[in-house]
Image (cartoon, rainbow, N blue to C red):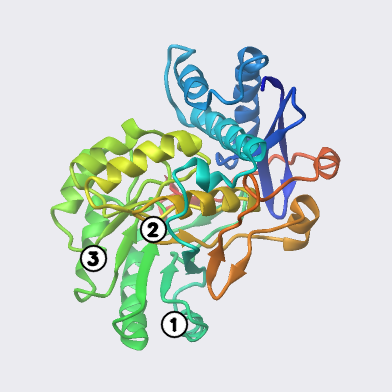
Amino acid sequence: MKITAIKPYAFWLGFRNVCLVKVETDEGIHGWGESGLSGRERAVVGAIEHFREFLIGRSATDIGALWQEMYRSQYFEGGRVLSAAISAIDIALHDLLGKALNQPVYQLLGGKQRDRIPLFITSTLAFGEAFVDDLLQKQSEGWSVIRATTGEHGRPGQATEFDPRRSLASAAHWLTRAREQLGPETVLGIDYHHRLSVAETLSFCQRMPTGTLDFLEEPIRDESPAAYQALRQSVDIPLAIGEELTSKWAFAPYVNQNLTQFGRIDLCNAGGFTEAAKITAMCESHYIDMMPHNPLSPLCTAASVHYCAAIPNLAWLELSPYDGDMSEHERVFGTLPTLSDNHFTVSDSPGLGIDVDEAAIQSQTFNFWEPPRLIKPDGSYTNW
């Protein structure tokens, strides 16, 4: 089964662009994958077009060998753009192989270890009484794992003031209040989206009673494992790290030095199924459960469901809080992953169990989109 075409599509869906790739073969079987590098989709399309030049005519079943060649063929290995492109192609190759064998992708990964995928839900509200009420409402709806955000999201392409000190003071106060109302059984965490320094993170953690949070996600940027080591030695809250890490090598210091307790792997950025399997096994050897990042289209969700079904060390999968206009998703994808009783059910359909209306996306346009720009009170840039 030879690859005959690789077609990248970057187009507007809901509230931002997505980047999908279709891999076709000489047997008439195709597969779909997705890249997760939001905001830089055109760069990923360029990388996919470079890979296409040597992938046409190759066996679509030699997935591991093709992964190695894509990763190493430019001599300068790795990087988020290349890894996102590899991820999309790798997912598509697994999708088409599953279809060729008439098997769901989870069977290619070793078989199903669970029938339902546990999820966590996110409150995006600003801190205040309404935030606590929202968490209590989600708890009443049966959600047992709830994540907060900073509640300050800015507006795409525009500058918004964000004061880290004021934010951490407010977050600590309202998360403490939330824990008092939720009780001890509900899992409660917060995603700080890389917005704090080590000192600010320490101050934040010190302002809450022990046991307030079950996880603290991405409080600082991920380029410095040494900074996370200093943080890990000083706080007692479990850390959730990894959504921007794009290979086993990037994950290695966080795993080997026990810097994280949850692996926030992103299947569409971390090399697809091929590399995710190796990262997951590495995490399993340190008793780290996976907590996949899932903020993209339903295709990413479908792929993540198969990944979660097949691994032993799963905590929860993210339920995207950023779906936008779901009617557009239904028009493009048709069959969406099935949400039942606050879990995703695992599809037994061949491949990923989801397909794309190629004619519909060919008529879609690409819109240049920039994430919000956050600035500190002194006018300097900080992370979104």
Instruction: Name the N-terminal-most of marks 2 and 3.
Output: 2
Q: Is residue 51 left or right of residue 248?
A: right
- The image's mark for residue 168 is none
Residue 314 lies, in percent from the top left, at 38, 57
Tell me the residue at 38%/53% (across/down). Answer: 195
**Amino acid type of the residue tagged 2 in the rendering:** Tyr
Disc 1 + disc 2, Cβ < 8 Å = no
The residue singled out by tag 3 in the image is 205
Which residue does the numbered mark 1 point to in the structure image?
132
How many residues crowd around disc 3 within 10 Å: few (fewer than 14), some, or many (20 or more)? Answer: some
Query: Residue at horizontal 45%, vertical 27%?
Result: 79
Q: Amino acid at mark 1?
A: Val
Residue under label 2: 192
Amino acid, disc 3: Cys
User: Residue 256 appears at what percent x and percent y?
Assistant: 20, 40
Counting residues from the start of the chain, the first of labels 1 and 2 encountered is: 1
| Image quadrant assignment for residue 327 | bottom right
The location of residue 68, given as percent across then percent down, is 45, 20
Dot 2 falls on a residue whose secondary structure is loop
Q: Looking at the picture, does residue 173 appear above or below residue 367?
A: below
- Tell me if 205 is positioned left or right of 72 in this view: left
